[in-house]
Image (cartoon, rainbow, N blue to C red):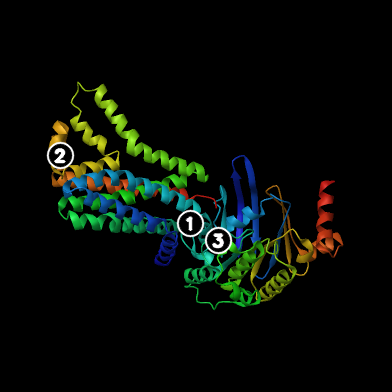
Amino acid sequence: MIVAKNITKTFGKLKALDNVSATFSRGECIALLGPNASGKTTLIKSLLGMIVPNSGSIHFNNELITDKWMYRNQIGYMPQIGRYPENMTVAHVINMMKDIRKDSNKKHDEDLVNSYGLKDIMYKKMRTLSGGTTQKVSASLAFLFSPDVLILDEPTAGLDPLASELLKKKIIEEKQNGKLILITSHVLSELDDLITEVFYMQEGKLLFHKKLSVLREETGEQKLSKAIAKVISAQAE
Amino acid sequence: MKKLLKYVIIDIVQNKIVLLYTFLLLIISLSVFNLENNAAKGLLSLLNIILILVPLICIIFSTIYIYNSSEFIELLVSQPLKRRTIWFSIFTGLSASLSFAFFIGAGIPILLYHADVTGIIMIVMGLFLTVVFVSIAMLAASITRDKARGIGLSILLWLYFSLIFDAIILFLLFQFQDYPLEKAMIGFSFFNPIDLARIMILLKMDIAALMGYTGAVFKDFFGTSIGISVAVFVLVIWIIIPFLISLRKFNRKDL
C-alpha cells in the first residue's frame, strides 16, 4: 500500500533519514520504534508530504506522491503534538475538517468523539484545552473519516489510562477492518496486543523490519520490550 | 479553495485588528476632510497618510498573521489539500479583508468628499498597494522560519520602500545633476510601488504643475493611456512576482 524507496532527508548537517526503504501493506499494524531522534516522525511526515525528502520516492497505492494531494483523503493522521488554530473552538475545528474532507463519501465515524465526551467541550477554544484533551481531539479527527491508513504518532502520550484504553480498543477494531495502521510509541508494553510488525530505526537508518511473530520466534521472548532489548544488545556486541 | 477562503476570512475577522484598521482609516479620512475647508487639500493630506499607513499595516499585519497561522497551515498540509490552494487562500483572504477595510475606511470618505477621477485613482492605488504589500509580506514570511526575523525583514522592506528608496534616488539625482535623468526617473519609479502610486495620484492633482521638468516628463508618460497601462501592469507584476516566489518556497517547505 505504501512503498518508500531510498528516502534521504537532511536538516542542515543532520541526516534525519538515511536511505530508508519500507513497504507497508494493508491489514498490518506496524510499530515504528527507535530511540529519540531516530527519524520516526520525519518518516511519517514524509509519507504525509509534510516534509519533502532530498531523494528517494514514495508510492501510495502504486502512485508517486510527489506534489500529489488527493491520496491524503485516505489517511488519518494523529500528530505527536497536535497544533490547532488557537481561536477556534473544538466544534469549529471538527466542522472545518468535515467541510474540507467532504468529497470523501464515507460516513463519519464519531465513535471516539462520543466516547471521549468531546460533545461536552465543543464550545471551548483550542487554546484553553489541556494537552491530553488536545490529544483526544487529534485522535478523534484521525479516526473521523474512517480512512484506509491511520498514522498515529505517539498516540497515547499524554492520554489518561482510560482514554488510551479506549484508543487501543479503537485501533484493534480498525485493524480488524483491514486497515493499515502505523504507530510510533515509546511505551512498548501497550503495543504487545496491537501490532503485527516491528519497524526499528536508529540514527535515521532502518535497523530491521520484521513480523512480530518472527521476532518472537527468533528471540524466544513473548514480550515486545524484551524481544527488542535482546535484538539491540545482540547487535551491540 | 472557497471553503478554505471562508475559514481564513473568518479567522482574520475574529482577529479584530482589521476592524481596528478600518476604524483608524475612517477616523483619519473623515477628520482630514473636515479639517480642511478645501476637499482637494484634504485629499492631498490623506494621500501622504495613506502612502505611509497602508503599506505599513498591510505588510506587518500579514507577516504576523502568517506566522501565527503556522498551526493552522500545519494542520491543513496533512489534509487532502493542495499546498498551492492553502497558500493562495491565505493570500486571497488577507488581500480581500485588508482591501475591504481600506475601501470602507478610506474609499467611502473619498467618494463622499471628492468623487472625481483623482479620488477614484487614489482608491484604486490604495487597493493596489494593499495587495502588493500582502504579497511582499508572504514573501518575507516564507523566507525565514523565525518569526522575529520575518517581522524584522518586513519592517526593513517597508522602510526601504517608504524612505530608503527615495533617499537613494535623491542621492543619485544630486550626484548626477549634470546629466538629464528625467527619463531614467520613470524607470526608477517602476522599482517602487509606493512611488508609482504616488506619481499616478499626484499627476491627477493640480499641484503636478509644481513638479518642474521631471513632472512634465512624468506627465508626458504617465498621462497617456499607454503610460497608465504600463503603470498598472508594473503594479500587477509587483503582486504576482513576490507571491509566486513565496509559493515556490512554501511548496518545498518542511512542516
Give neighbour class at mark 3: few <14, some 14-19, many 20+ (Cα, 10 Å): many
Q: What's the chain of the residue with tag 3? A: A
Q: Tag 2, which secondary structure?
A: helix
Q: Amino acid at mark 1?
A: Asp
Is B198 on the left or on the right of A165, as rendered? left
Residue A141, given in percent of the width and then of the height, sits at 58, 69
Three-letter amino acid code at disc 3?
A: Tyr
Identify which residue, A78 or A56, lies in the foreground.
Answer: A78
On the picture, is A46 further left or further right than B51?
right
Camera-near label (1 vs 2) is 2
Q: CA distance from mark 2 to mark 3?
A: 52 Å
Chain bearing tag 1 is: A
Give the percent coordinates (x, y) of residue A200: 73, 55
Query: Can you identify the residue that label 2 sits on?
Result: B208
Q: Residue at x 46, y 44 (%)?
A: B151
Helix, strand or loop for disc 1: loop
Q: Which residue is mark 3?
A: A84
Tell me the subunit letter for badge 2. B
Amino acid found under the numbered disc labelled 2? Ala
Callout 1: 10 Å neighbours few (<14), some, many (20+)?
few
Kindly indicate the quadrant of the structure image that contains residue B173.
Answer: top left
Q: Which residue is mark 1?
A: A67
Mark 1 and mark 2 residues within 8 Å of each other at the beta carbon: no
Quarter of the figure that contains the N terminus of chain A: bottom right
Q: Is residue A90 left or right of residue B159?
A: right
